[in-house]
Amino acid sequence: MSKKIQIAVAGFGLVGRRHAEVLRRAPDMTLAAIVEPSAEGQATAATLGVPVFASLEEMLQTSKPDGVLLATPTPLHLEQGLSCIAAGCPVLIEKPIAVTSEDARQLTEAADNAGVPMLVGHHRRHNGMVQAAKRALTEGAVGDIRAVQATCWFYKPDHYFEVAPWRTQKGAGPISVNLVHDVDLLRHFCGEVTSVQAIAVPSRRGFENEDLATAVLRFRSGAIATISVSDSIVAPWSWELTARENAAYPATSESCYLIGGSEGGMSLPDLRVWKHANAPDWWTPISSQVLTCKMDDPLAVQLAHFAAVIAGREKPLVSGWEGLRSLEVVEAVALSSATGREVSLTDEAGRKSAEFACA
């Protein structure tokens, strides 16, 4: 019988606890250790019967696992990610990869130079619905993707901000906290973004940050996406309330993404593909069929993939470079909304995360 992959979890908050529970149920992985600085978190983690450490450095010096999952606050990702890389330990970093694209680039280049696998936890790409949609789009189910409408609307209650006042500060609004998830999926479906035009609205609750933003993304393929995000709108149209990924969110039967193509349309996450009977023609009947997909827990699928990368059987689905590019788009949205100008993103041959478009 092959040896189980030993994974340590750093950060025992809501996300870290979900990962730890997935590891405890996994047939070919083991929860090796937990890193948590708070006394309360350490007490809870100790009930799982695994070593608990107050710092990542202490854990790496004492018991080197096969891999580390960083579920710590984003400002810690750079330092802790570099520590894992220096120790030669493969690392899966929760999204976003870092606070800034500069930090993300430093992390990614360090991992590449050291030959240490680094993945970014954009778990939605591991969702069976997303995989089915990606496969169908690649096979031409809707023809050429022309446009996407993505909605990310939900209402965060006041106590969400009261327990963590930093969430009310500048830079902690839905653009930086929530939008990176949806931007990553749009890149997954449509390819690289070449420019961004965005507008944001100040918080109605009097916070320092925005509570509503809308952006137009232009892709290298010629497709255009409109994406709207708000944490102060009551609505059923968000990935959290439609994808059924997390039981903490009450599920609805709505969709939050509409993908329009030259030969058909698709809605997600209900996986409906719409086409006219013979050829595209708005005077002829249009009908839909629903694609089938696996409904496994995407966090479990992601961790199994991490284990396969550690074992050398697979290449990262969401590499550090992928996490970096999604973060660059979010930075461009923030910059465009602050300046009122279009922001251009170049390709890898001359990438600049926030270059003003000359128009």
Image (cartoon, grey):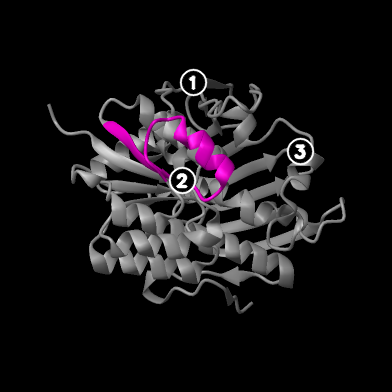
Up/down of 86 relative to 264, above or below: below
Q: Is residue 132 visible?
A: no
Residue 181 % position (x, y): 55, 47
Question: Does 30 appear in magenta?
Answer: yes
Q: CA distance from mark 1 to mark 2?
A: 25 Å
Q: CA distance from mark 2 to mark 3?
A: 22 Å
Q: Which amino acid, mark 1?
A: Val
**Residue pointed to by mark 2:** 122
As helix, strand or loop, the secondary structure at mark 1 comes to strand
Viewer-nearest of labels 3 and 1?
A: 3
What residue is at 56 percent from the left and 52 percent from the top?
180
**Residue pointed to by mark 1:** 290
- Side of 21 where 269 appears, left or right: right
Q: How many marks?
A: 3
Residue 155's disc number: 3
Residue 31's disc number: none
- Whichever of callouts 3 and 1 sits on the residue coming sooner in the sequence is 3
What residue is at 66 percent from the left and 64 percent from the top?
334
Residue 38 % position (x, y): 56, 48
Q: CA distance from mark 3 to mark 1?
A: 29 Å
Q: Which amino acid, mark 3?
A: Tyr
What residue is at 79 percent from the left and 35 percent from the top?
234
- State which quarter of the image contains the N terminus: top left
Label 1 packing within 10 angstroms: few (<14), some (14-19), many (20+): few
Residue 39 % position (x, y): 56, 45
**On the image, which quarter does residue 123 sit in?**
top left
Up/down of 53 relative to 18, above or below: below
Image marks 2 and 3: residues in contact by CB distance under 8 Å: no
What residue is at 28 percent from the left and 33 percent from the top?
29
